[in-house]
Amino acid sequence: MRILLTNDDGVHAPGLHVLEKIARTISDDIWIVAPSEEQSGAGHSLTLTRPLRIRKHGEQHFSVTGTPTDSVMMAISNLMKDCPPDLVLSGVNRGANLAEHVTYSGTVAAAMEGAISGIPSIALSQVYSKEGMADEVPFGCAEAWGERVIRKLIDAPLGNRKLINVNFPAIEPDAVKGVRVARQGFHDVDMTKVIKGTDPRGYSYYWFGMDTAGAQAPHGTDLAAIRENYISVTPLHFDLTHDGSMAALEDIF
């Protein structure tokens, strides 16, 4: 099995090293094509206004000066065009990709791009317990459970052009209660924080942050699975059509 690894945290991210270690327990044919720099929050964006460059870091190991989507497209359409991957693994992301936040996620978008190309794809994310941990985020749960989760998903009858979103809770591996298949949740409060600062010349600048305080976790969702110390597994697809509104709109027109 030929496996393509990518992410949105960048080619040197600790989570990518964890993912490579996991992948090499499954196959010895591993390709890495990831963004040259962190692209968190890039979503499914594609670079169209500047050229992209590829850097080779080793055998079957490359970075791309673009987004996670750019990286997967470059891998499938260029670097691996004569030997396409059988599986795309994206991650392991530093932080959760749950609920509606999957729409911002470069990690999920990279897996989605693989799925669009007809390749089974899995996004993997490690939840962390508090902000400000930087590269100190522990990946122990993902590292301990990643292989067994991926092996089961490889054999799952998912149909064409689907992807799987996996999140590992921020707990010790032996505290995990199991794996729970859950639907995508939705935060019932606005999670966005706008953090204002002032630069040395007196001009304002802003950071976006996330605040999880007060959010509910409805039963059966990925949010609830993580809160209850389960690994969440959520099947996703990129058909955004809202079937329930089709008839009402047809009546209008």
Image (tube, helix red, strand yellow):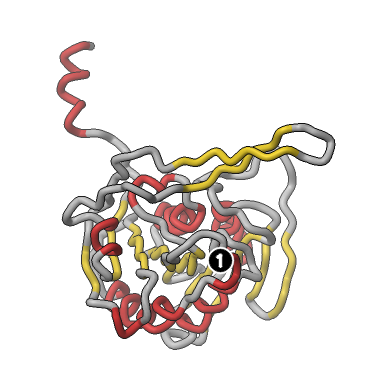
The correct choice, above or below, for 240 with respect to 131 in the image is above
Task: Report whether 43 appears left or right of 51.
Answer: left
Identity of the residue drawn at 44% across and 59% down: 111
Task: Report whether 49 appears left or right of 21.
Answer: right
Q: Residue furthest right?
A: 201
Q: Who is closer to the viewer here, 106 or 54? A: 106
Identity of the residue drawn at 23% across and 11% down: 253
- The answer to which quarter of the image holds residue 60 is bottom right
Q: Position of residue 158 (x, y in %)?
A: 25, 62
- The answer to which quarter of the image holds residue 45 is top right
Q: Is residue 59 visible?
A: yes
Instruction: Identify the residue under disc 1.
Output: 133
Badge 1 element:
loop
Q: Position of residue 13 (x, y in %)?
A: 61, 69
Q: Residue furthest top?
A: 253
Q: Position of residue 36 (x, y in %)?
A: 69, 61
Look at label 1 and name its amino acid: Met
Q: How many marks?
A: 1
Q: Position of residue 225 (x, y in %)?
A: 25, 63
Identity of the residue drawn at 50% across and 68% down: 84
Identity of the residue drawn at 31% across and 44% down: 187
Q: Is residue 117 visible?
A: no
Task: Report whether 186 appears left or right of 126.
Answer: left
Q: Quadrant of the N terminus?
A: bottom left
Q: Who is closer to the viewer here, 161 or 22? A: 22
For label 1, the crowd category at 10 Å Cα-Cα, with few meaning under 14, some 14 to 19 and many 20 or more, is few
